[in-house]
Amino acid sequence: MNEVNSFDSGAVGQNRDSGFDQLAALEGHAAALDSDIAAQYAPPGDTAGEAAAAIGGYDAALEARTLLQVAREALAPIYPSLRAVYSDETCERIAQAAAPVMHKYGVTAGGIFEKWGPELALAVVVVPVGMQTVKAIRHDREQAALAAQQPKPKEAPANEPQAVAAA
């Protein structure tokens, strides 16, 4: 194809005293591979190389929109109204507003999940169970309150004989 396939891996180790040179060689090789892959999968008529730029670039708005939509779908079984509140259009507007903030503070989903991944995974499992636990306890309390409000059967006085059911 191009120079990507003729990459000389020996060039990476030629100057073992300079890790920077090795890193620069690897980055150059990676960039060439990215460009080659982008060109292979570019849509017809992509003469400006927009697809190649998209593969190598970070799209904070796309990441924010995807996170919002995933959160919406994950929480919808517990809170069905979220699908109406967080429509695709709303997620897009929030994502477009969030992207500059994400760039400013260097926030990425990868960074969030790297730092808080285990905690988030635990929350995804525990929160729905916790919600169901709260619902179950409320239900049990309501049933107990209803049972307490129902009249109790009259007890026969101790000196009167009780009717015995015929066997």
Image: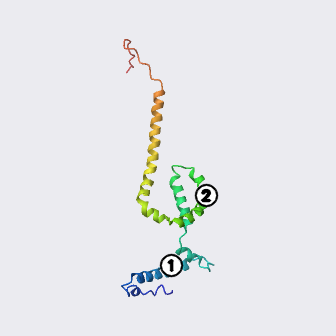
State the image coordinates of residue 60 (x, y, percent, origin top left).
54, 66
Q: Is residue 2 above or below residue 130?
A: below
Identified at 47% across, 24% down, the residue is 151
Query: Would you place residue 77 above or below residue 113 in this image?
Result: above
Give how far across and how far down residue 95 sits, in percent: 58, 62
Q: Mark 1 = which residue?
A: 34
Q: Residue furthest front?
A: 104
The residue lying toward the viewer, choosing from 145 and 108, is 108
> Given the image, on which type of amino acid does mark 2 rest?
Thr
Please tell me which of labels 1 and 2 falls first in the chain.
1
Q: Percent from the top left, x then y, of residue 79?
A: 53, 49
Identity of the residue drawn at 39% across and 81% down? 19
Tell me the amino acid under the disc marked 1. Answer: Asp
Q: Is residue 122 left or right of residue 38?
A: left
Along the line of sight, which residue is nearer the eye, 10 or 155?
10
Q: Is residue 126 above or below residue 17?
A: above
Residue on which the image places disc 2: 90
Mark 2 surroundings: few (<14), some (14-19) or many (≥20) residues within 10 A: some
10 Å neighbourhood of mark 1: few (<14), some, or many (≥20)?
some
Q: Secondary structure at mark 1?
A: helix
Residue at x 60% of width, y 59% of height = 88
Q: Nearer the viewer, residue 43 or 96?
A: 96
